[in-house]
Amino acid sequence: MKRVIALLMENQPGALSRVVGLFSQRGYNIETLIVAPTSDPTLSRLTMTTNGDEKVVQQITKQLDKLIDVVTVSDLGESDFVERELMLVKFNKNSIASDEIEKFEGKVVFEDNEIINLQFVGEPDKLDKLVETLNTKEPLEIVRSGSSGISSNSKTLTI
Amino acid sequence: MSKKQTSGADALIQSLHKEGVELVFGYPGGAVLHIYDALFNQSEVEHILVRHEQGAVHAADGYARSTGRPGVALVTSGPGATNAITGLATAYMDSTPLVVISGQVKSELIGTDSFQETDMIGVSRPIVKHSFLVQKAEDIPEIVKKAFHIATTGRPGPVVIDIPKDLTDSNHTFEFNYPNEINMRSYKPAKTGDPKQIEQAIDLILEAKKPVIYSGGGVIQDNASAELTELAKLLKFPITNTLMGLGAFPGSDPQFLGMLGMHGTYEANMVMHNADLIIAVGARFDDRITNDPKQFALKAKKIHIDVDPASLSKIINVDVPVVGSAKECLSALITELNKQKIDTNKVEPWLKQISEWRNEHGLNHSMLDIVPDNGKILPQQVIQSLYKETEGKAFITSDVGQHQMFAAQYYFFDKPRQWINSGGLGTMGFGLPSAMGVQFAFPEDTVACVTGEGSIQMCIQELSTCFQYGLPIKIINLNNAALGMVKQWQDMQYGGRHSASTYENSLPNFCALSESYGHVGIKVTKLDELESAMKECISLKDKLVFLDVDVDPDEHVYPMLEAGNAMDFMHLSKDKKTW
């Protein structure tokens, strides 16, 4: 089962490698991973998606929490949450028509005589389906950001 | 008046002094020369020069395990740092509090593949509790404070401080301030157990008819032996210890079942398999205990007390998990139980069953009375002779293999911190250097290193350190001229094909070797010489003695769990098994 885990960690060199290293060391999978500083510059927020049953995810969150640089961990799946992913796609200008872009809810973020870059934002599952469709139109490159997530209740991941 | 200015190197030594560090085990090299110069100029922190960095970390480890205080090692960059890795992994697996300081190349050279450069933080990452790469000399005091705090609290473990050479240079000085307290928002280990969980544990304890206490190294780490013993006595519950937990409950007490697990006693493993309640304290249900986790103690409810939340329900699902320090949680249980009426008669039939198991297949504790037909000395006899001669009071360190198991089975450890071995990582070469750490901490006590001719050769260079510092360690070498445990497995599972497990007459004369290092060597080849030789060995109070005993090379360690089964599947001898 896919799970989304979010955590806050000290914004320090080496902190990320401890998190990533933990996954390979203990044989867990990372499907996607995003890290960025928060509005508190001493903290980074990391969001990852992983696969595993309840027991595995529990171990993952406990092991993450044990890392000294990790301040707090949350398995977002414990409550309702919103998950979104950003996808950028590059086409030859003549590969995709503007009405199709509109139909797929894409946004043109760059355009010249040869190239057009599109931006899509959505739930990862929907982007998966969209990729299948877009692949029939010979995209030059597809880049996905990996999932970001936020819980849908008043609970926040703060310290 | 302004405070005295210090260099980073001086600040490091002063910080160690502030932490109460008396001994540092280390080995100098380019990246730590400033630190060694700072050591030279003071007398508060004594430096012990080992012969290999692995020895430094193991010695610090032995010091830490025997005293309960953090051990400190100092190594240089590159090979110095990588040589420390086995020591770090050993300490990590057994949760020993260590602070290991490694020199690093100058800040400006990091990442350039410069001479003796290794990414110590990267290399050590999976085997440390935490690590620090110092970036400013002024940060050294705070980092040292944090390192000791992290190493010694919660589930203890080794912490690395990697210091680039330029940050210890005396051309840069600053005002030394050592923080009194440290507050880390990301690190707050639990202490007391949740009262609700304690209450649930009490309910299970009062109901149990076939209970057992299974305790591990966590009890020793947390100095909770008195509480553990009190609880066991109060309830009259039988108790077994893991390899790491031996000594937490008096080994010679009849309530003690012996060690459990892979080479645990018949009665301990039978009790675990048939129990209706297992109270695990500071133990982690590792694979040397559970055998097949799917078949582990299926009839038992389980209470698990551990300071590390990640240890709970990691391998075995438990009914009542209690996160907290062993000492605090055991005290809470005792306090609550004292309010209850405890009916110890309820466990009487269980205790009777246990004594039947013990009589049936328990270990023979009068091995010295046996005279084997083949005239050879049994390794167990050497341990019993050592036990007798030291009156059970010696510190025993060991290496890894058959000798380690024989020591664990046949020496009754009545006190915590008396038995020091590499249980988790299983590091050959640990015995002698860890014994040095113990002997430094307890100069008046007998410290014996039970080893084999394989393990001892993995850190034998430390015989030189022992001579330099006059450490009168007793090395008890169970010499079977083979890698005994490897050979045992080859006998049992590989049709007796002894692939690379014997030395083909290439072993040194250990007595002559020890003598060349300035020590005493005593060779024993006959059983009737054993006890007098042991007496002589132990009585030479001021000398390191290498007692090299030829033991029966065909002896196996039993009981032994049959892999892939429940805990009641045991080999009891070469031709007897329980199934």
Image: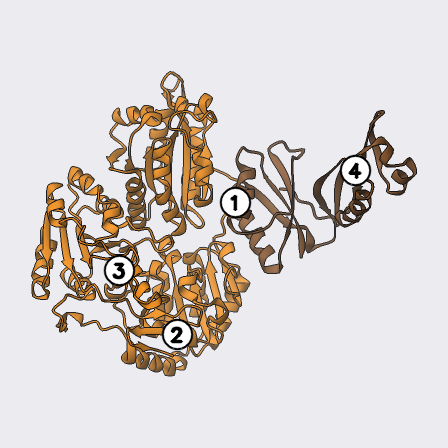
Q: Which chain is brown?
A: A
Left or right for B125, reference B220: right
Which residue type carries mark 3? Gly
Q: Residue at x 42, y 38 (%)?
A: B147
- Tell me the residue that label 4 is attached to: A139
Disc 3 to disc 1, how far (Cα)? 39 Å
Q: Is residue B405 visible?
A: yes
Residue identified by numbered label 1: A67
Amino acid type assigned to the residue bearing label 4 in the image: Pro
The percent coordinates of residue B184 (x first, y second) are 51, 39
Q: Which residue is mark 3?
A: B484
- Depth check, mark 3 against mark 4: the one in front is 4
Q: What's the colour of chain B in the image? A: orange
Colour convention of the picture: by chain
B185 or B246: nearer the viewer: B246
Q: CA distance from mark 4 to mark 1?
A: 41 Å
Q: Indicate the amino acid at tag 2.
A: Phe
User: Horizontally, is B503 left or right of B189 in the view?
Assistant: left
Q: Which numbered mark, 1 or 2, is in the foreground of this view?
A: 2
Identify the residue shown where x is 70% and y is 48%. Answer: A155
- From mark 1 to mark 2, how far is it between C-alphas? 38 Å
Q: Position of residue B16 (x, y in %)?
A: 34, 34
Q: Do circles 4 and 2 both sit on a common chain?
A: no
Element type at mark 2 = loop
Locate residue B143: give its quadrant.
Answer: top left
Residue linked to disc 2: B569
Q: Position of residue B372 (x, y in %)?
A: 14, 72
